Image: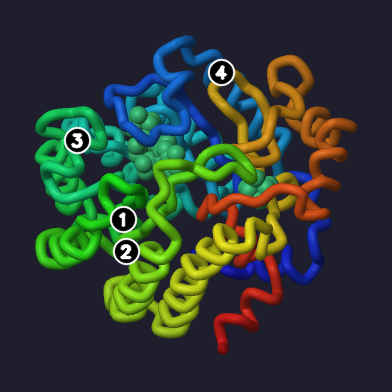
């Protein structure tokens, strides 16, 4: 992972006029029914409106990209996912691409990942969404046999990893009442049975911006898990093994991020300066442009073009509200990027 563009951004303090990190929600289609999915009402309602040409136009409006997240829906259901990757590789020289997946489409995921690795030059991360040990995972995801499918996908990806050093696999678990008691067992299980996983990430289940989610476990239970989490993160010797310095920094940042999320819940305030709408933005499957995943759209790439939407009066109003910390949330992706793009976070890591 390249840190230089983030450090440059943090020093220039938010003068970039297009985001360094972009989340593209490439589809609203999905083959699972997760109890906690924030996207549940929109799943499988609308065809994917953005075409490859639309992505080509969007990418030409952006400058260099550090990170691209291809989410959904289930991204591997999106036709032309490899071609979409190629567009941002070619036009924006994107450094890192992350694709989260429920891991159900074993053959398709393996084939698409192999093609991406063969034809694109960025570092690729596949994040397997794993919400518990077998029974717990299948109950949350609403798919019998889903856990075993995810393991088959994992095994296929590990084989590809052996051929490509710029490809990593992670597991991501969303914490909620239904799995919080299962988490210590899950951590041990992943450690013992998934040696190809470079990091096991945890996300708190969330509602809208500044909105309490009733699926969240009580704060005390989360704080107690926070201590387990910190020990797990700092003991991980598979995280960025190629650089001891980067690994040390990244692990401290990761452990701090979880503590910051708990502070957000406790204080009901934005405890980091969120880069939503400055260093980071979102384009969804309809082409809507959002400053972050939780706030309303500020325009549409098909109707207005990306830059016009990104710089619209509505976007400016929302940006002012974000700067004034009128919203808060525990979205770890925005939080991680906010830390990477903020000088204060680098100082905190040293403490
Ligand atoms: C929206 S899914 C899209 C990719 C793919 N369908 C999957 O499940 O990995 C991306 C991640 O968001 C998580 N997620 C879904 N609903 C959430 C919520 N309400 N709060 C926090 N994370 C959530 C999922 O568990 C998954 O790890
Ligand atoms: S697999 Fe992903 S998009 Fe589909 S319901 Fe689950 S969390 Fe939502
Ligand atoms: S804190 Fe950031 S990610 Fe969260 S709602 Fe506000 S702008 Fe969005």
Q: Is residue 232 above or below residue 44?
A: below
Q: Is residue 283 left or right of residue 78?
A: right
**Mark with earlier residue (2, 1):** 1
Residue, disc 1: 170
Q: Position of residue 24 (x, y in %)?
A: 54, 34
Tell which of 122 and 290 is nearer to you.
290
Seen at 35% across and 71% down, the residue is 224
Q: Secondary structure at mark 3?
A: helix
**Mark with earlier residue (2, 4):** 4
Seen at 43% across and 52% down, the residue is 204
Residue, disc 4: 50
**Residue 320 visible here:** yes
**Mark with earlier residue (3, 4):** 4
Structural distance between the alpha carbons of marks 3 and 1: 21 Å
Seen at 49% across and 42% down, the residue is 213
- The residue most toward the bottom is 351
Structural distance between the alpha carbons of marks 1 and 4: 28 Å
Q: Secondary structure at mark 4?
A: loop
Please rate how many residues cluster around mark 2, counting C-alpha atoms within 10 Å: few if below 14, some from 14 to 19, many from 20. many
**Residue 139, label in figure:** 3
Please rate how many residues cluster around mark 4, counting C-alpha atoms within 10 Å: few if below 14, some from 14 to 19, many from 20. some
**Residue 119 visible here:** no
Numbered circles on residues, count: 4
Instruction: Assess whether mark 4 and mark 2 are in contact (beta carbons under 8 angstroms).
Output: no
Residue, disc 2: 199
Instruction: Assess whether mark 1 and mark 2 are in contact (beta carbons under 8 angstroms).
Output: yes
Q: Quadrant of ligand 1?
A: top left
Q: Quadrant of residue 29?
A: top left
């Amino acid at each position: 992972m390249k840190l230089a563009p983030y450090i440059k951004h943090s020093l220039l303090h938010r003068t970039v006029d297009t985001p360094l990190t972009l989340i593209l929600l490439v589809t609203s289609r999905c083959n699972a029914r997760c109890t906690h999915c924030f996207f549940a009402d929109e799943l499988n309602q609308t065809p994917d409106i953005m075409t490859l040409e639309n992505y080509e136009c969007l990418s030409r409006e952006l400058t260099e990209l550090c990170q691209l997240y291809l989410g959904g829906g289930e991204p591997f259901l999106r036709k032309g996912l490899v071609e979409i990757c190629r567009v941002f590789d070619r036009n924006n020289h994107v450094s890192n691409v992350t694709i989260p997946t429920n891991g159900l489409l074993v053959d398709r995921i393996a084939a698409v990942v192999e093609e991406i690795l063969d034809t694109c030059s960025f570092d690729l991360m596949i994040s397997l969404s794993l919400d518990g040990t077998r029974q717990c995972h299948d109950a949350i995801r609403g798919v019998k046999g889903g856990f075993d499918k995810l393991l088959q996908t994992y095994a296929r990806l590990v084989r590809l990893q052996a051929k490509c050093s710029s490809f990593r696999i992670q597991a991501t678990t969303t914490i909620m009442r239904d799995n919080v008691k299962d988490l210590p067992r899950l951590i041990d299980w992943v450690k013992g049975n998934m040696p190809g996983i470079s990091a096991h990430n945890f996300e708190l289940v969330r509602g809208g911006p500044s909105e309490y989610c009733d699926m969240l476990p009580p704060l005390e239970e989360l704080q107690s898990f926070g201590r387990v989490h910190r020990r797990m993160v700092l003991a991980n010797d598979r995280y960025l093994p190629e650089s001891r310095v980067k690994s040390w920094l990244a692990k401290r940042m990761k452990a701090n991020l979880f503590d910051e999320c708990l502070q957000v819940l406790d204080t009901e305030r934005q405890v980091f300066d969120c880069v939503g709408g400055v260093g980071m933005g979102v384009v969804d499957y309809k082409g809507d442009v959002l400053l972050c995943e939780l706030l309303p759209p500020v325009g549409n790439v098909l109707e207005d073009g990306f830059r016009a939407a990104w710089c619209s009066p509505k976007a400016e109003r929302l940006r002012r509200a974000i700067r004034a910390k009128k919203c808060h949330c525990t979205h770890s992706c925005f939080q991680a990027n906010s830390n990477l793009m903020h000088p204060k976070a680098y100082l905190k890591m040293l403490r």
